[in-house]
């Protein structure tokens, strides 16, 4: 009997040793040893050799920075992107980076290589009573309160701007009309600009950034939406044909706050707008809308990011674009991240592009990262195409000529975004601008 027990103990010990060896090979920890398989961690497949000792999803745990330490995992999760106030931390741009693969770097005219010491655009502010408008120094505590640059061009602007313009809607204040910042370009030398917009708790208002003239500009816009506040920010890029504009716009959303962000890009040679919204407390609600209309040779790029970092928040994204003419190029990249702590998230993003003539190109890339399954809903959609023949047939069957029918379809397609602005004079102006674009095409 003792011999039988000895045999059982020996077999059990050998089986246990085999199990431990197998567990070690697939990445499970053991008390005595760990055998790694290249490309894998305990958490799963690791696609990047840079991620050897981190989660495949990157995240805050795989990135360390204190006010912009230049750390991160390139091209991993949005949570793992490099952030820094210093351009040197991003290295030289090659065009192979994920953030820049669609952008013609040669047309940036020095924003990514030169010191941005040119004359910044003139800035005029028209604001209702009660709104505080100030010029503030780089050392002001409000600088850096909403976000940290995620690319070299934005970091260069952060390093090189001289003073910032601050617009504050005081707590418990509801402003009538809108605050309008007219940004008029007067120089073609690479320049930097910084704007801070603050809606204090339980305030309500609309702020319009109206870009005109000619400039080569890298711009950072910080937006702070306090607890219970309701803020709409409209950024209009109506530049002259030779302008180059890169604008990074960072929004920080407080508890139960509502934020609407609208981007309208019509003019300029190259325009690249990168808005981001980050929830910092529960109950936030974000809407992000965009309209762009690219003519021959224009490059209009939109890269947005919604960071669901808190529970029970909601976001909706809708961008629409139209293209006409040879080499008209639009880019839309929509990143939404639902972090593991963001239970109860409700999010949806959509992009639609309408090709009006031959020779244009629309790149559309929706991205959705979900780190928790405890959400209300999440989805995205993207479509690029020509006119819907059924729409045209419906209108033409009612006696509307084809050219007029096409104009009606385009107008209806884009007006949905214009109507979100809720500033009547600006809506009328942009509607007229769309009409001029259609007339310029020669096809309608």
Image (spheres, rainbow, N blue to C red):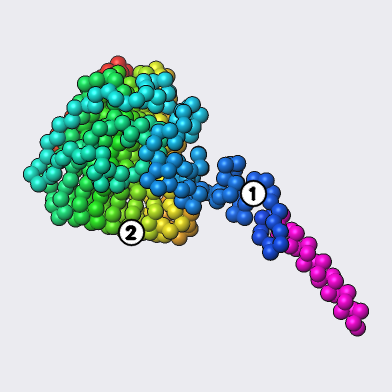
Determine whether, in the image, residue 125 is placed left or right of residue 140.
left
Disc 1 target residue: 40
User: Distance from label 1 to label 2 (Cα)?
Assistant: 35 Å
Say which residue appears at 20% left-offset and 37% top-offset: 165
Examine the image and state in which quarter residue 341 appears. Answer: bottom left
Residue 47, magenta (yes or no): no
Residue at the limit of the structure toward the bottom, as seen here: 1
Q: Earlier in the sequence, mark 1 or mark 2?
A: 1
Q: Nearer the viewer, residue 87 or 322?
A: 87
Q: Secondary structure at mark 1?
A: strand
Image: magenta residue range: 1-25
Rendered view: 87 above or below 283: above
Q: Residues within 10 Å of mark 2 (few under 14, many from 20)?
A: many
Q: Quadrant of the N terminus?
A: bottom right
Measuring from the top left, give residue 4's x and y in whole percent: 90, 78
Disc 2 target residue: 282
Rendered view: 197 above or below 159: below
Say which residue appears at 33% left-offset and 59% top-offset: 282
Measuring from the top left, give residue 30's x and y in whole percent: 68, 62
């Amino acid at each position: 009997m003792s011999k039988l027990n000895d045999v059982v103990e020996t077999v059990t010990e050998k089986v246990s040793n085999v199990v431990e060896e197998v567990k070690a090979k697939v990445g499970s920890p053991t008390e005595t040893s760990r055998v790694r398989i290249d490309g894998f961690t305990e958490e799963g497949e690791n696609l990047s050799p840079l991620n050897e000792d981190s989660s495949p999803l990157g995240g805050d745990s795989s990135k360390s920075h204190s006010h912009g330490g230049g750390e991160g995992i390139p091209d991993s999760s949005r949570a793992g992107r490099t952030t820094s106030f210093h351009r040197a931390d991003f290295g030289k741009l090659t065009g192979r980076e994920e953030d820049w693969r669609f952008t013609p770097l040669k047309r940036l005219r020095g924003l990514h290589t030169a010191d941005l010491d040119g004359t910044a655009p003139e800035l005029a502010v028209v604001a209702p009573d009660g709104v505080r408008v100030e010029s503030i120094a780089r050392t002001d505590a409000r600088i850096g309160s909403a976000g940290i640059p995620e690319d070299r061009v934005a970091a260069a602007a952060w390093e090189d701007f001289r003073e910032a313009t601050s617009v504050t809607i005081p707590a418990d204040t509801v402003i009538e009309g809108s605050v309008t910042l007219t940004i008029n370009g007067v120089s073609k030398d690479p320049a930097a600009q910084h704007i801070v917009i603050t809606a204090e708790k339980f305030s309500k208002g609309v702020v319009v950034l109206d870009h005109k003239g000619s400039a080569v500009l890298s711009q950072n816009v910080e937006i702070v939406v306090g607890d219970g506040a309701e803020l709409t920010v409209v950024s209009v890029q109506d530049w002259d044909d030779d302008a180059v504009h890169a604008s990074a716009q960072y929004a920080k959303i407080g508890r139960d706050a509502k934020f609407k962000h609208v981007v309208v890009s019509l003019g300029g040679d190259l325009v690249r707008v990168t808005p981001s919204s980050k929830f910092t407390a529960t109950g936030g609600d974000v809407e992000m809308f965009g309209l762009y209309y690219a003519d021959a040779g224009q490059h209009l790029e939109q890269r947005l990011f919604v960071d669901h970092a808190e529970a029970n928040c909601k976001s909706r994204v809708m961008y629409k674009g139209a293209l006409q003419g040879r080499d008209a190029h639009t880019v839309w990249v929509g990143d939404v991240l639902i972090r593991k702590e963001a239970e109860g998230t409700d999010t949806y993003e959509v992009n639609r592009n309408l090709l009006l003539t031959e020779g244009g190109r629309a790149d559309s890339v929706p991205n959705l990262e979900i780190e928790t399954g405890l959400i209300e809903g999440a989805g995205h959609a993207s479509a690029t195409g020509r006119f819907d023949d059924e729409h045209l047939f419906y209108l033409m069957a009612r006696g509307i000529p084809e050219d007029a029918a096409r104009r009606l379809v385009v107008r209806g397609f884009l007006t949905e975004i214009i109507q979100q602005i809720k500033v009547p004079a600006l809506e009328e102006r942009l509607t007229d601008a769309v009409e001029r674009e259609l007339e310029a095409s020669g096809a309608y």
